[in-house]
Amino acid sequence: MVLNSWEKAKEANPDTPIIMISGHGTIETAVEAVKKGAYDYISKPPDLNRLLITIRNAMDKTSLVAEAKVLKAPGEQGPGNGGLFPHRSRRSRRRSKR
């Protein structure tokens, strides 16, 4: 079954959005695919505008997820503040908000 191959691909690289395109799928197949993490499900023949928009949105999501991981990663940027104020603790940030 196609979903088995898709699941293996998702395991290998979980951050890659997968768009399922099928001419033999049913609503149940589409729901199952999305529940298992598919970005979208498009039936054949695909509407090219919808396909292009879906691909663009999936690429944008991938970029945003990667950017969020970088911003959340601890390191030289300082914990949790994106490197804006690496020398400030949470307590001093709370005081400055008052």
Image: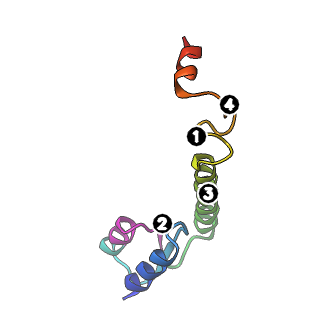
Q: Amino acid at mark 3?
A: Ala
- Residue span colored magenta: 30-43
Residues under numbered marks 1 and 2 in contact, where contact means CB atoms less than 8 Å apart: no
Numbered disc in front, either 4 or 2: 4
First along the sequence among labels 4 and 3: 3
Decide: is 81 above or below 32. Answer: above
Mark 1 to mark 3: distance in Å? Answer: 18 Å
Q: Nearer the viewer, mark 1 or mark 3?
A: 1
Circle 3 — which element?
A: helix
* Residue 79: image tag: 1
Residue 73, how many percent across, how many down?
Answer: 59, 50
- Residue 44 versus residue 72: which sits nearer the camera? 72
CA distance separating discs 4 and 3 = 22 Å
Name which of mark 4 and mark 2 comes first in the sequence.
2
**Amino acid on which the number 1 mark rests in the picture:** Pro
Magenta region includes residue 7: no
Q: Which mark is residue 85?
A: 4
**Number of the front mark, 4 or 3:** 4
On screen, residue 13 above or below 53: below
Asked if the residues shown at circle 4 and circle 1 are in contact, with their CB atoms under 8 angstroms apart, the answer is no
What label does residue 40 carry, if any? 2
Which of the 4 quarters of the picture holds residue 88?
top right
Alpha-carbon span between mark 4 and mark 1: 9 Å
Circle 1 packing at 10 Å, graded few (<14), some (14-19), many (20+), is some
Return the x and y of residue 28 as percentages of the image width and height: 30, 72
In front of the other: 40 or 73: 73
Q: Secondary structure at mark 2?
A: strand
Q: CA distance from mark 1 to mark 2?
A: 35 Å
Mark 2 crowdedness (10 Å alpha carbons): few <14, some 14-19, many ≥20: some
